[in-house]
Amino acid sequence: MACRFNCRNLALRRDLNIAMKINLLVAIVFWTIATIQSAYAKVIPPLLPKSILNMPATKAIKLPGIDRLVFVDEPIYPGSNFTWKEATKGGSRIPVDTMFDGRLYSAAEIVQNIIDFARDLDDIRAQFGNRPITLSSWYRTPAANRAARGRPKSLHLIGMAGDIRISGISPPKVYARLAPTWLGGLGNNTAYTHIDKRDRLGWTSGRWVY
Ligand SMILES: [Zn+2]
């Protein structure tokens, strides 16, 4: 239609009309996508499990002798039930070179000891019917050992000791069940069981009560 009067107004109305139609179209498209998405989520499980989606970003640490960063939630070796978080108290105790019983243990060697100790813990876990094991103490830096009033020759200092609790079994019972076969040291306590690998140092196996 030719425009002779008030042409600007007419053009404005036409533009507004188009804009409203576009808005409506956009609203319909979004509503359709939202509807399909919610229906989709009910029928098909999400591509990633919720546990992964909800996982908080975990801390990464540099461990001596390991040439990449490791996340504290990573298993200590593939398939292990134990993580670096447990061995390093949440990533706060990174192994350091340590004088122990007259010899220097390098930080990288202590990291290897932690890996070996995780294998022993997994064996114990299997031995006790795969009950979860929690550790109140594992590796200790010299400073952490002093703070915990650990002995100067505590095997926690070289990653070869852990204070464990096995879910549903009292620490004295854990001690009693391990005592006949465990080659290293065992400390009995009502709150936890200390286990260590003193046999690997050639020390005679120890049994004691705290
Ligand atoms: Zn201990």
Image (spheres, rainbow, N blue to C red):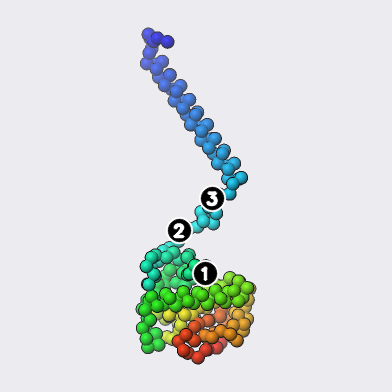
- Residue for badge 2: 57
- Residue 64 placed where, x, y %? 37, 72
Q: Nearer the viewer, residue 150 or 44?
A: 44
Res 80 label? 1
Q: Foreground mark, 2 or 3?
A: 3
Q: What residue type is labelled 3?
A: Leu
- Residue 200 placed where, x, y %? 47, 85
Residue 205 in sight: yes
Q: Relative to residue 103, is residue 172 drawn left or right?
A: right
Residue pictured at 58% horizontal, 70% vertical = 132
Mark earlier in primary sequence (2, 1): 2
In this rendering, the answer to whether 169 lies above or below 22 is below
Q: Relative to residue 35, is residue 98 drawn left or right?
A: left
Disc 1 crowd, CA 10 A, few/some/many (<14, 14-19, 20+): some
Of all residues, the one furthest to the bottom in this rendering is 204
- Residue for badge 3: 47
Quarter containing the N terminus: top left
Q: What residue type is labelled 2?
A: Ala
